Amino acid sequence: TTTTTTTTTTTFRTKKILPPQGHSFRPSSSSSPCACATRNNAKNGRGGGGGYIRRSGSVVTAATASASSSSFANGGGRSTDFTKKATATTSTIRNNINKKGGGGGKKKQSRGKTLIVTAGTDYYELLGVSRSADTKELKRAYRQLARKYHPDVNKEPGAEDKFKEISNAYEVLSDDQKKAIYDQYGEAGLKNGMGGGGYGGAGMGDFTNPFDLFESFFGGSAGMGGMGGMGGMGGRSSAQARNRPTQGDDERFDLEIDFLEAVFGCEKELDVMRLEDCDTCSGSGVKAGTRPSTCGTCGGQGQVIATVRTPLGNFQQVTTCQACGGNGQTSTPCPKCGGDGRVRKSKRISLRVPAGVDSGSRLRVRSEGNAGRKGGPPGDLYVFIAVREDPDLKRFESINISTTVTIPYTKAILGTTVKVRTVDGTVDLKIPTGVQPGATLLMAKRGVPKLGNPNVRGDQYVKVKVTIPNKISNEEKALVEELDKNQK
């Protein structure tokens, strides 16, 4: 008896791993690739010669073979002889992909057809590392990308989704077992619990909260502190950071001043409510006569570690110690400040408002804000200026002033001198002969001093408004008629 075997091998990208389906196999009760892979292995063990191999995390080689006689126990003990020839070609595969819109799902196959699969997310490409990258390269890549796409920093659309994908990729590639499964079966292997060894269906596709992973890197821990105990927790340094002196918050004060005060500057007395060091405990927050002691719950680290056993190993979750609030110490709080070390008091502060300020100007008074914690430096006081409007003088372009004068039509014809109010007081302004209604006259250097450079001043612009009477006497009418004749 002569047995002829024909084998065709096709390599292509995959997103889902689906088992090759043949005429001689009964449909499995589970669509899991794990169960189908097991059935295929059983076939190989009975001389079927078929194989289904995952390579490099994203390439699948599907092979089918024929045998003159082979049997496989299927279902209720029945055996079926089958002969199967691999007839699919590369062009057939491409045509099938086009018909299915990319081949993202399971395709019903006739005898001799090859399984069609598509590419999924490449975790290596996502992190920008090679497949031979070691732990240091993975950590370095994750740190850079996590900082770049963290939603608190990156407000672009899609940044948070990108951040989560990066965290998932690092979690898989940094764990030896998950990485091995991903390299062999891809994402589908993680989601469907492939890999054998008792890990099927053990939640291999479940990922850690990406923000917890980020905090383990940048929130004071010295290492991952997660899957399999990859490093120390750094809790003591975190507690020390909380007990360090910190600068106080800035304080805001709103000040309203008159128009001329804003032009030339002024002195103001401000009553500011702010946090100051408690004089009872000298800012320590501890009751007088007592001393803080090491927290018995966290041992002074400020953090507690909860360990959960999983099929993948021990998972350690770090949380802030509730007993000490993360300080690593417990103490009897000061009755006056309640343990904060600061109390709110009012203080009078002298402020020099410079010339040239305007509504919206902000003045900074250094070290006059709220007191810092644990002896830290105080914040600053920011004074926001609001300027009351003047009924006659209008400010524009920061340093210029405009005003309006009204004269009768006879004065507009003959010319005159009028009194004009300026920021320096009342000044005589000469109106030239024949001035037109709406004309604007310039009074140089009568404007507002420039903020920060009071030697430079703006100008004042005077708009001339001419009034024409509604009624005139007979004598005035005769004069106007005579003037009209002379104009002709």
Image (cartoon, rainbow, N blue to C red):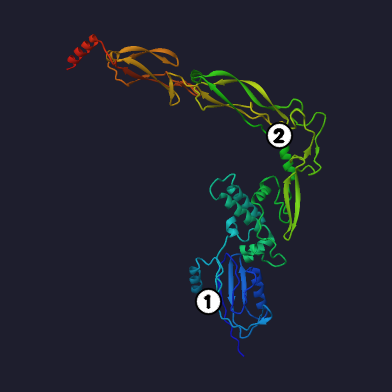
Amino acid type at mark 2: Pro
Q: Secondary structure at mark 1?
A: loop
Estimate how packed mark 1 is, as few (under 14), some (14 to 19) or many (20 or more) residues with alpha carbons within 10 Å.
some
Q: Residue furthest top?
A: 475
Does residue 423 appear to the left or right of 231 in the view shown?
Answer: left
Q: Crowdedness of circle 2 by 10 Å Cα count: few (<14), some, many (20+)?
A: few
Q: Residue at x 72, y 66 (%)?
A: 198
Q: Residue at x 61, y 62 (%)?
A: 187
Instruction: Tell me the residue that label 1 is attached to.
Output: 88
The answer to whether residue 329 is left or right of residue 215 is right
Q: Quadrant of residue 246?
A: top right
When the figure is inspected, residue 394 is found, relative to residue 104, above or below; the finding is above
The x, y position of residue 95, in whole percent, is: 48, 71
For the question of whether residue 10 can be seen, the reply is: yes
Quadrant for the N terminus, please.
Answer: bottom right
- 135 above or below 150? below
- Where is residue 64 drawn, in percent x and y? 59, 77
User: Which residue corresponds to mark 2?
Assistant: 245
Comparing 438 with 240, the one in front is: 438
